Amino acid sequence: MEETSQFSKLRGIFFPIYAYELKKIVPLACILFFSLFNHYCLKNIKDSLVVTAVGAEAIAFIKLFLVPPAAILFMLVYTKVSDRLKNEHLYYATLGSFVSFFILFVLVLYPLKNYVCPSGASIARFQTQFPSCGLAFAIIGVWPYALFFIFAELWSTFILSLSFWQFMNQITELQEAKRIYGVLLLLGQGAVTISGGVGFIASNIREKVSCADPWQITLYWLIGSVTVTSILSMCIYHWIYRHVLTDKRFYNKPELPGFHVKDKKKSSLWNSLKVVVRSHYVRLLIFLVFCYSVCDNILENFWKHAVKVIYPNINDYNTFMSMYTFIYGVLSMGVVLITGYIFRRFQWGVGAMLTPMVVLVGGVCLFLSFLGEQFLSGSVGMMAGIQTTIVYVGLITLVLDKGFKMSFFDMSKEMAFIPLDDELKVKGKAITDVFGYRFGKSFGSGLQVILLSLVSALSGVKATYESIAIYAFVVFLTCATVWVISVFRLNRKIQRNRELS
């Protein structure tokens, strides 16, 4: 008999939570809420800084050459520190490090950017002397923005995936996860909508203040919000350890997760990799994450290029991106309402397959819009209309992409880790999230950089995203196909394991 049979039909679908479980669900939902709120605030800020200062092409360059080394360095530090700190203190150290940088950026690096960055004349001179490295020099010219981009990009990996969801998988059983993960995601997704609203208001503050740089005031408001919510997250996390995990109804193991540091088995990153790659199950999970990251990266960069053409001003760009975040948050809340029910009602593979199908259909529509632009010619007004069409087709595609990713994709991925043993659960998740996501995005960015460079070299004219659309489309279709195949294979393994158990 299903565990939800004790609830009414509607409550079993939308809120299958017992009253006593609110003591656990509410604080966890608050941490997820704050983490997602900060993630989307930082995401819009980093894109606004880099795209309006350098161009959307810089995103691919940064994700290829700067984010992966930073992710590896962070992972090495995280692994070493995790051997010496309790899980609770590791969370404080990780979150505190990120927030400290963002405070440093808004109080020091951004106000002093004209002093700490090379002059525009110097950058232009180097770009003239070394034209093939023009994009690299442009990024060096705004290196604090690139550094902010790196920290904001790694937030989702180290704060959301490793710090929050790994903790959730340690204190949750599989049957319990089917009930509560969907509810957690629903409550957390409210943060996406609110972050979009906050970003919209903060970006339009220039209409109410008179200063030389209204964007700096916007940064004060947004980074201040990130700081306050991060401090609240630490306080709630402390409360969970003291009052929730000590309650046998919620955590009935002899020791709290990661409580005794001396008992932790220390291992190198290389040994962790060897443990993970021996598991075909985890390798399939890595394929899922890798293929999603490649597809998402390609779609997002192409779309942001089109958005920058329509909204070149940094405040206008961030206003539009905040509107996009708000719309995505509203839609994803509707999707999350049925996520838990789908996973309880059908096999794991049904819920896991929805995201690649949505991304595939939406991606085809976006690329057809890009390709259509190359075959249509006419007046300036017609071209502007085509650009606007691309922006809004991409908006719909990315809203659906992110909405289904945050609900069905994330929930299916986290549930797939729960049956694994403790070593694979921790190490497999760390490798999957860090290497799968980061190197998937870097692979997608690398392909774009290579295509832009090759087309520029062969044509003698600086390539744009429009000129490489057909080649990126082929890569997108290939990765989407591998993603679908991996879901089929992993679903067979999950069903086989369930039958054996």
Image (tube, rainbow, N blue to C red):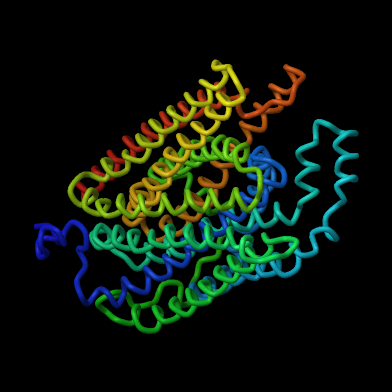
Asked whether residue 5 appears in the rendered view, the answer is yes
Residue at position x 53%, y 72% from top? Answer: 230
Left or right side of 77 for 372: left
Q: Position of residue 370 (x, y in %)?
A: 53, 26
| The one of 259 and 114 positioned closer to us in this rendering | 114
Residue at position x 58%, y 26% in the image? 381
* Among the 4 quarters of the image, the one containing residue 443: top right
In this view, 303 is above or below 28: above
Residue 73 in the image: above or below residue 290 = below
User: What number of labels is visible?
Assistant: 0
- Whether residue 202 is situated above or below residue 149 in the rendered picture: below
Quadrant where the N terminus lies? bottom left
Residue drawn at 18 percent across, 56 percent down: 13
In the rendered image, which quarter is residue 417 located in? bottom left
Residue 282: horizontal and vertical position, in percent? 42, 46
Q: Is residue 358 above or below residue 148?
A: above
Residue 297 locus on image (x, y percent): 54, 40
At 54% from the left edge and 51% from the top edge, which residue is drawn? 434
Residue toward you, 410 or 46: 46
In the depicted view, which residue is nearer to us: 271 or 409?
409
Name the spot of residue 78 as percent of width and height, x first.
59, 63
176 sits to left or right of 319: left
Q: Is residue 475 left or right of residue 73?
A: left
The answer to whether residue 262 shows anywhere in this view is no
